[in-house]
Amino acid sequence: MAHEGHEHGPDCNHEHDDSFEIEVVELEDENGEKEEFAILEELEFEGRNFAILAPLAELQAQEEGTADPEEGLSLEIFEVKDDMFTPLDDEELAERLMKHLDEQEAKLKAEEEKD
């Protein structure tokens, strides 16, 4: 999938919540169809750069309360190289990456509880 930048500003074609700005990228699939994704997390793992993305429409539906609460978000992992987003097809690497994120989240929660 190719990456096309998205500039936030007064000429955007969608609304923004000023209290929390989400970085959005527009990706094009192999059929030439474009979809906007919210970047939930960017990280370096095992010497490579990754982004955890969710479809923007799903995230907006959750925020507006119009999404089915049992469905959750569709998360997708992309490797990022030179502004190119490539879907991560290596299941073992994806599992290690998600385990790493879960461990980081647990550490943050433990630190917050100490304070």
Image (spheres, rainbow, N blue to C red):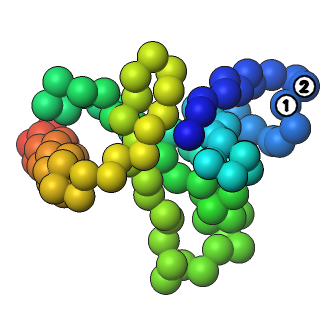
Residue 107 or residue 74, whichever sits in front = 74
Question: How many neighbours does mark 2 have within 10 angstroms: few (below 14), some (14-19), or many (20 or more)?
Answer: few
Q: Quadrant of residue 79?
A: top left
Q: Secondary structure at mark 1?
A: loop
User: Does residue 52 appear anywhere in the picture?
Assistant: no
Element assignment for label 2: loop
Q: Name the quadrant of the C terminus.
A: top left
Asked if labels 2 and 1 touch by Cβ distance under 8 angstroms, the answer is yes
- Residue 62 horizontal/vertical position (percent): 61, 65
Q: Work out which residue is located at the far top of the displayed protein and give it.
A: 82
| Percent x, y of residue 42 | 37, 32
Please tell me which residue is depicted at 48% across the width and 46% down the height of the picture.
53
Quarter holding the N terminus? Answer: top right
For this orientation, the residue located farthest to the front is 31
Identify which amino acid the numbered label 2 is placed on: Asp
How many marks do you count on the picture?
Answer: 2
Q: Judge the density around disc 1: few (<14), some (14-19), many (≥20) Cα neighbours within 10 Å.
A: few
Answer left or right for 5 relative to 86: right
Q: Which residue is mark 2?
A: 11
3D distance between C-alphas at marks 1 and 2: 4 Å
Q: Which residue is mark 1?
A: 12
Task: Kindly identify which numbered label has been placed on residue 38.
Answer: none
Q: Residue at x 43, y 53 (%)?
A: 76
92 over 10 or under it: above or below: below
Left of 1 or right of it: where is 67?
Answer: right
Q: Position of residue 71 (x, y in %)?
A: 51, 78
Judging depth in this view, the residue of 2 and 8 nearest the camera is 2
Q: What kind of residue is marked 1?
A: Cys
Q: At which x and y percent is residue 99?
A: 15, 54
In the picture, residue 8 is in which quadrant? top right
Residue drawn at the location 25% of the way across and 52% of the way down:
90
Q: Please say whether residue 108 is visible from this viewpoint.
A: yes
